[in-house]
Amino acid sequence: MSLPSFAAGSGKKRPNIVFVLADDLGWGDLSCYNPYSMVPMANANRLATQGVRFTDMHASSAVCTPSRYSILTGRYCWRTELKKGVLWGESTNLIEEGRMTVASMLKSEGYYTAGVGKWHLGLGNGAETDYTKPLHPGPIDHGFDYYFGIPASLDMPPYLYFENDHVVEQPTSSTVGSKLPRGVFFRPGPMAPHFVFDEVVPTVTDKAVSILHERAAHRDQPFFLYVALPSPHTPWLPLPEYQGKSKAGTYGDYAVETDAMLGRVMQALQETGLAEDTLLIFTSDNGADWKPGDIDRYGHRANAEWRGEKADIWEAGHRIPFIARWPGHIRPGTVSEELGSLTDFMATTAAITGAPLPRNAAEDSFNLLPALLGKKLAKPIRDTIVDQSLDGMLTIREGKWKLEEGLGSGGFTAPIRVEAAPEGPGGQLYDLAADPREMHNLYQKHPEIVAHLSNLLKTYERQGYTRAM
């Protein structure tokens, strides 16, 4: 198979790479995935007509921190000390010292690397964090030349902006939090005096657009821009101009605002003349926080027909929208059914740029470039994929078979965990080809498949990698 090489010295211009990550956006929010969506996401849907849309893409986890760790490192987060849950705003940095990231890899290849938005990989030193001093380790210690953003989710203190290694405005004020109706929740804690919750999304987008205009003056150097939007994660606080734009309440309106921010990035790329030389990716860090009561109230299925929601081990927790555009390389309006994971971003960018991947980096990352380019494949790029729920339950999938190592959702949907009955199944096994909604547990019917997948998962855990070495 012949694939383009953009390695330094190849004579070909290496592409800019812009990765736009929505927060808790569901597979079913986009009408290009779900024709019954009640959320008009015109820009994301237009992007799908200009590039390739993946239908079987997965976050490595059903919640924020582990998914972001995997995007930037190409490694499953359950290999770290964080075996379940997420970090807090004042947590210590999760990325190991010296570990290669997408940013550090691209920086070593001559790229300018910048990030904006939600970090959520640890920026402090627990309760002892002194925000008057430089914050290390943080994004600039992991390969970013520049970073502007917030420490964690918009419902987690401290509520402040940081730029590179310093806080823009000290969190000398505080908030008692919010106990308003569902979706408008945020925790009490320290806050910068001029921090305004509903201004965060446009503020980080302003920074992204500013970076694009600045990089247009340096066309001799390719760049990587990581845009981690903190929406439509709670609190759902759409600006007035987006309120009422969907038929899915404030969540849907916030998703419309998220789409508008993607549109601003697309417009900036076009205005600066950078679009033709840029690989633009739009995706989400996990499924939507959208409960049965929300479906009943609005008739909107943010996770389409997939079972569960954000945080769950079932498909709705980790199956995500993923759209990529690269003019002249990705054929417009195409669809890929290739199995993929957000961990694959690192190996794919390495393949595009010619960057070498050492054995101690991107251990779970596979090169999806052939699928992006629409190449005919003799066999799947990935044989398997591993995902993780909020409480640390793991699932492994091989082909049509998906094994979940426990009973229950492992996340938000009740029951979270179910103790196995003496004569009952010890986990969940589903045939996704025949049963994509995961309604018929075949754990006891196919003990040979359970044993095979269980042993394979144990092998992956023991050997420390899944990609070919």
Image (cartoon, helix red, strand yellow):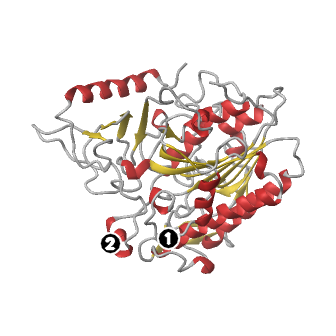
Choose between 151 and 284: the one closer to the eye: 284
**Mark 2 vs 1, N-terminal side:** 1
Mark 2: few/some/many CA within 10 Å (<14, 14-19, 20+): few
Determine the secondary structure under disc 2: helix
What residue occupies the far top of the structure in this picture? 469
Horizontal arrangement in the rendering, residue 335 relative to residue 50 (left or right): left
Name the residue carrying label 1: 252
Label 1 crowd (10 A; few <14 / some 14-19 / many >=20):
many
At horizontal 68% and vertical 68% (from top left) the residue drawn is 202
> How far is disc 2 from disc 1 in space, using C-alphas?
14 Å
Question: Amino acid type of disc 2?
Answer: Asp
Secondary structure at numbered mark 1: helix
Name the residue rendered at 28%, 43% in the picture.
434
Q: Is residue 367 left or right of residue 440?
A: right
Residue at screen point 22% across, 46% down: 440
Residue 285 visible? The answer is no
The amino acid beneath tag 1 is: Gly
Decide if residue 221 is on the left or right side of residue 59.
right
Observer-nearest residue: 201 or 335? 335
